[in-house]
Image (cartoon, rainbow, N blue to C red):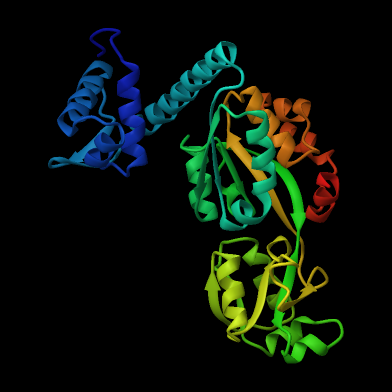
Amino acid sequence: MMTGHTMKLQQLRFVSEIAKQHLNISRAALALHTSQPGVSKQIRQLEEELGVEIFARSGKHLSHLTAAGETILAHADEVLRQVSAIKAIALEHADKNAGTLGIATTHTQSRYVLPPVIGRFIGKFPRVALQLHQGSPVQISELAANGTADFAIATEALEQFSDLVMMPCYYWNRAILLPRDHPLAAGSTLSIADLARFPLVTYTFGFTGRSRLDEAFKQHGLAPNVVFTAADADVIKTYVRLGLGVGIVADMAHEADKDSDLIAIDASHLFAPSLTSIGFRRGMHLRSYMIEFIEMFAPHLSRGVIESCALTQNTQERKALLAELTVPRYADLLTVAD
């Protein structure tokens, strides 16, 4: 039975962080800049107040969340989201053009797509501190879902996180990169069978639309001979230059001026297009400069559409709203930017 209404916001933060740190109290205390005994004491006090165990214990260690703990954690996370939204609203009214913006994304986005967008953004909002987090698509999604980053921008894995509101940014495809003396460089239109004859150098599975490549070979009853993988297109190009194999990269990763020693062949007839999306936490208050960043990155996402997506709790309604949009190809976005 509850002994009094003394529950503290900090206790809910402790519960949430312990869950994020896979029940490791030491790591949770480190992340929260406090002591392990202090965290343990506050969790015990909260459990005593609520009259239920949130965490089951095995000796001195936490073993798992109890059934009550699972539900309490979900509500604690929601309360913390709302507190974060209240703080963001206050900041918006205090100073619209100052704050921070955390973006979690892949190497391809941060190296080839984001620089001109971030350049424009910094020019308009010089007092917003930008933080760029790079990682795998799953890591990126987790960073946005747990609040470390405001936005996740990636091609794969974002749909796995139900806590993220996803909006489509652009479609893109692939380019085949070859040394100038490669046998395929002199041929006509390439086929999947042509590619299957040679060693391939491409993305690590789970990165930058890699799944589309594997699907294309499977549909033809072929297996790609992938001899080298990397998460970074610059690394892939380096090994293509060394003659290790035929490179397959995102088309935006081919830079005509810097890659003039390589032949680039459009591969949109070989592979289904991939969709890059931007995601943010459900219930998050988007500050005005955050909305402007999305508009700069994906001009077809207007302020009205972004705000409607942020406010709509029903996933099906949000999908219906986004289905009405015409999502551009990356090449068309470049034309708009010019």
Vertical comparison of 220 with 208: above or below? below
Locate residue 52, reporting x and y percent. Answer: 26, 24
- What is the x, y in percent for residue 232? 56, 64
Based on the displayed image, in which of its 4 quarters is residue 43 positioned?
top left
Please name whichever residue, 87 or 181, is drawn nearer the observer in this view of the structure: 181
Instruction: Give the answer, above or below, for where 31 lies relative to 127.
Output: below
- For the point 56% across and 26% down, the residue is 127
Q: Relative to residue 99, is residue 298 drawn left or right?
A: right
Residue 174 drawn at (x, y percent): 73, 67
Q: Tell me: 148 left or right of 334.
A: left
Determine which quarter of the picture holds residue 221: bottom right
Q: Return the residue nearer the eye: 113 or 44.
A: 113
Height in image: 314 above or below 107? above
* Residue 17 appears in view: yes
Q: Residue furthest top?
A: 4
Along the line of sight, the residue nearer the viewer: 254 or 135: 254
The residue that appears at 61% across and 55% down in the rendered structure is 111
300 displayed left or right of 221: right
Q: In the picture, which quadrant includes the N terminus?
A: top left
Identify which residue, 22 or 337, lies in the foreground. 337
